[in-house]
């Protein structure tokens, strides 16, 4: 435990501590005093200092959702936790604590500067989510293995690293190893990496450097560890290629899901029909069934591919329809906005002149007349802006209704054709069922007569007790296949209709929100100019 706090009671972070810290760190001026009186919302705090508080456990920080900088150094914290909601954190100081493992940082994807100086950490890991990491301080810990340095190669933006005070920093080859495996590093242990900080390497390879040539700094480090780095780069490239391939597959799958035809570009649906079909897999051993099954599969997959390709084409049509609709909406809104701006600009051309004329008017009667005229102009502006908005509402309503009809027609056509193709899959299954049943009954007759030449597995022969048993087995397989086909069709239809319904609802809601926001803007502007006129009238009458 940190010796500074041996005589002080350990504390757990609570709301009272946080309120006190926020209040003490706020501005000291009049605005700061007012903020302390009314209360400062934790969500508005960007920086928080909680050092030297004898904190044992991190807690209650979930309300600081916009926090950028957090200082928790010089406490007795044993575990990194309670930071999950601080997703905007950029700077985090946990130095001078009792932390033994790096953990609890998976959501801090914006973190750039992390200090874990003077803790009890023995391994560098669990930092993968910190893709923006630039500064990492891990000095005065218990890190002893060079492999920890290789782990840091994944952080492409890392420029500053501190490992001094760790056993690994006492290794003879430490600095050269770091420079070789982290070539983009600029600062190591508070020193800038340059040709002067690395002693020239003396070995049997030195003569390979020609006369007048001298390998120094990072160049020397790379030469010494060339073979290890080359091997590591090869592994990294293979891993990266695999990750790129997996990402491409995920992206492709998402595109197929958006078209509602994922996993229909092959034999997935057919294979799923037999994955749980115990009876069907047994019956596949019967004479002639293997050829029958292959022919069935080939035709079935062709239909699935037709559904898949048709789905992608229809998805592209829906996308074009949606993009065209959005362009039309934005053009209409922009044109309406421009008309409103022109109307306001025309009003403001005379507004200042009218206000000045009112200020200079000395007669009450004339003053009232001018104010009344200006009030009338403001009312006309208000009516003109609302009229423009009503025209836009009508225009967009027509556009939305047209789009709704078009997209629903596209969806209905897509579903109708897919259902027709799925019906072909069911027809194939029915035909296969008939053929399989025929072969099974013929096999049963041969077994009963002792005329079957082929040897069948024991569990297959167990089906051929009587006709009812074999008919039930074939029927069970058939029912399972039809269920798989029906479920895939139902899933496609349900998701497609749901997508269409949610899209149309969202468009209507967005238009309602836009209209309310625009009407509010108009009211606020008109109220502003009217209040300006009213205040001017009052001041002139008083004068």
Image: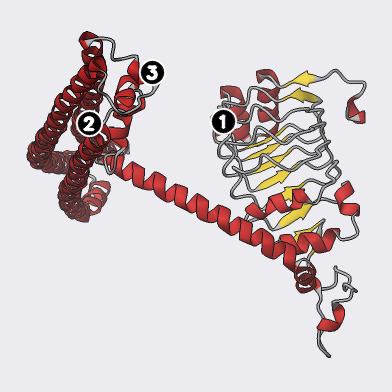
Q: In this view of the protein, can residue 212 be seen by the observer? A: yes
Which tag, 2 or 3, sits closer to the chain's start?
Answer: 3
Left or right side of 510 for 92: right
Q: Residues within 10 Å of mark 1 (few under 14, many from 20)?
A: some
Which tag, 1 or 3, sits closer to the chain's start?
Answer: 1
Which quarter of the figure is the N terminus placed in?
Answer: top right
Left or right side of 95 for 457: left
Q: In this view of the protein, can residue 400 be seen by the observer? A: no
Q: Which residue lies furthest to the front in this view?
A: 450
Q: CA–CA distance between discs 2 and 3?
A: 37 Å
Instruction: Give the percent coordinates (x, y) of residue 369.
Output: 14, 41
Determine whether the residue tagged by mark 2 lies in a helix, strand or loop. Answer: helix
Instruction: Give the percent coordinates (x, y) of residue 204.
Output: 89, 76
Q: Mark 2 points at which residue?
A: 492
Left or right side of 323 for 198: right
Please give the name of the residue rendered at 18% of the width and 22% of the height, measured from the top-left corner.
442
Q: Residues within 10 Å of mark 3 (few under 14, many from 20)?
A: few
Q: Mark 1 points at which residue?
A: 85
Tell us which disc is closer to us: 2 or 3: 3
Q: Which of 147 and 309 is in front in this view?
A: 309
């Amino acid at each position: 435990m940190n010796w500074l706090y041996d005589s002080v009671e350990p504390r757990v972070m609570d709301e009272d501590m946080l309120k006190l810290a926020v209040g003490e760190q706020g501005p000291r001026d009049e605005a700061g005093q007012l903020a302390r009186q009314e209360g400062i919302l934790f969500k508005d705090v960007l920086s928080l200092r909680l050092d030297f508080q004898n904190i044992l456990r991190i807690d209650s920080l979930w309300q600081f959702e916009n926090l950028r900088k957090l200082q928790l150094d010089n406490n007795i914290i044993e575990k990194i936790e309670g930071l999950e909601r601080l997703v905007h954190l950029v700077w985090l100081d946990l130095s001078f604590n009792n932390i033994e493992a790096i953990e609890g940082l998976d959501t801090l994807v914006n973190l750039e500067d992390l200090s874990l100086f003077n803790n009890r950490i023995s391994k560098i890991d669990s930092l993968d989510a910190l893709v923006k990491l630039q500064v990492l301080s891990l000095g005065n810990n218990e890190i002893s293995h060079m492999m920890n340095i290789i782990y840091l190669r994944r952080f492409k933006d890392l420029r500053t690293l501190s490992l001094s005070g760790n056993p690994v920093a006492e290794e003879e080859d430490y600095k050269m190893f770091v420079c070789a495996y982290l070539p983009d590093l600029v600062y190591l242990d508070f020193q800038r990496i340059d040709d002067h900080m690395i002693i020239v390497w003396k070995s049997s390879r030195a003569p390979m450097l020609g006369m007048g040539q001298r390998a120094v700094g990072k160049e020397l480090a790379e030469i010494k560890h060339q073979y290890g780095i080359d091997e590591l780069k090869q592994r990294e490239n293979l891993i990266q290629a695999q990750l790129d391939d997996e990402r491409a597959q995920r992206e492709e799958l998402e595109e197929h899901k958006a078209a509602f035809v994922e996993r229909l570009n092959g034999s997935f649906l057919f294979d799923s029909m037999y994955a749980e079909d115990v009876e069907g897999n047994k019956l596949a051993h019967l004479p002639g069934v293997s050829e029958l099954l292959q022919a069935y599969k080939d035709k079935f997959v062709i239909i699935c591919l037709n559904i898949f390709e048709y789905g992608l084409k229809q998805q592209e049509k829906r996308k074009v329809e949606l993009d065209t609709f959005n362009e039309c909406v934005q053009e209409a809104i922009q044109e309406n906005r421009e008309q409103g701006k022109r109307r306001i600009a025309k009003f403001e051309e005379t507004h200042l002149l009218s206000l000045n004329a009112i200020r200079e008017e000395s007669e009450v009667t004339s003053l009232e007349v001018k104010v009344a005229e200006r009030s009338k102009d403001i009312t006309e502006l208000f009516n003109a802006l609302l009229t423009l908005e009503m025209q836009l509402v009508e225009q967009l309503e027509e556009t939305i209704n047209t789009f709704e009809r078009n997209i629903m027609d596209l969806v209905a056509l897509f579903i109708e054709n897919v259902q027709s193709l799925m019906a072909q899959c069911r027809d194939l299954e029915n035909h296969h069922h008939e053929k399989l049943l025929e072969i099974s009954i013929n096999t049963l007759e041969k077994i009963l007569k002792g005329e079957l030449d082929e040897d069948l597995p024991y569990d297959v022969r167990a089906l051929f007790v009587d006709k009812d048993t074999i008919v039930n087995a074939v029927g069970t397989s058939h029912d399972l296949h039809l269920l798989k086909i029906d479920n895939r069709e139902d899933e496609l239809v349900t998701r497609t209709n749901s997508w269409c319904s949610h899209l149309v609802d969202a468009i209507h809601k967005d238009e309602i929100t836009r209209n309310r926001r625009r009407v509010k803007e108009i009211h606020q502007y008109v109220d502003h100019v009217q209040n300006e006129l009213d205040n001017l009238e009052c001041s002139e009458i008083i004068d």
